[in-house]
Amino acid sequence: MVTQNLVAAAGTAEQEQLLLSLSSELANNDKPVESRRMAGSQLLEATAKAANLWVSMDTVIKSQIKDLLLTTLGSSLEEEARQASSEVIAKVASVEIPLKQWPDLFQSLLRNMTQQGIPAQVKQSTLETLCYVCQEISDPPLVNNEVNNVIRAVLLGTLPCEPSGVRLAATKALLNVLGFAQANFRVEME
């Protein structure tokens, strides 16, 4: 509630800087867990309430925030930071994907599932992110290739060679992905 009031009271430039500062705090592994937890919570609250603000924000700042969120997802040692990042990515994606403003999101997430040496917790967080994104976007304006990447990432998480936490996250994500990718299942070759 505090962040929502700050975002509402601040001018656009201040709002953008606040969101960028919260993203930086969340992404910083050297910051205390409590500080990162608070930043993640406030960032989620702010992005959930400020879709109109997000659309009108400076593209450079939006890009910096998205990069920080993906960095947090892929490198954070703190589970709560990755969780918050997953949820914020989904909120941002729910605004940007319909406007075709985050074309490389799914490719970035797929890379987390396919690159060698990616830690299990990063794969698990990636699958949770896909789950949240699919929940947030009810009618995805995606081309078949993008939907196929989402399906592929989730199916990779179900492989027997993956740890149980990754397989569980993939199974949970699968339910949301099925609705998300419904049109692809109508095409026999997909």
Image (cartoon, rainbow, N blue to C red):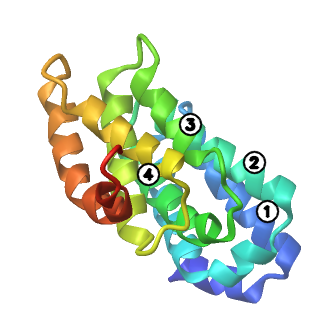
In this rendering, does residue 117 appear at all? yes
Of 42 and 142, nearer the camera is: 142
The answer to whether residue 132 is above or below residue 167 is below
- Where in the figure is residue 49, as x and y percent of width and height? 56, 82
Residue at the spot x=58%, y=47% of the render? 105
Q: Which is in the foreground here, disc 3 or disc 1?
A: 3
Marks 3 and 2, the one that precedes in the sequence: 2
The answer to whether residue 40 is above or below residue 116 is below
Instruction: Determine the CA span between mark 3 and mark 2.
Output: 15 Å
Which residue is identified by label 2? 64
Instruction: Determine the CA span between mark 4 and mark 2.
Output: 16 Å
Q: Is residue 174 left or right of residue 66?
A: left
In this rendering, does residue 33 appear at all? no
Marks 3 and 1, the one that precedes in the sequence: 1
Identify the amino acid type marked 4. Ser
- Where in the figure is residue 132, as x and y percent of width and height? 37, 60
Identify the amino acid type marked 2. Gln
Marks 1 and 2, the one that precedes in the sequence: 1
Which residue is identified by label 1? 17
Instruction: Determine the CA span between mark 4 and mark 1.
Output: 21 Å
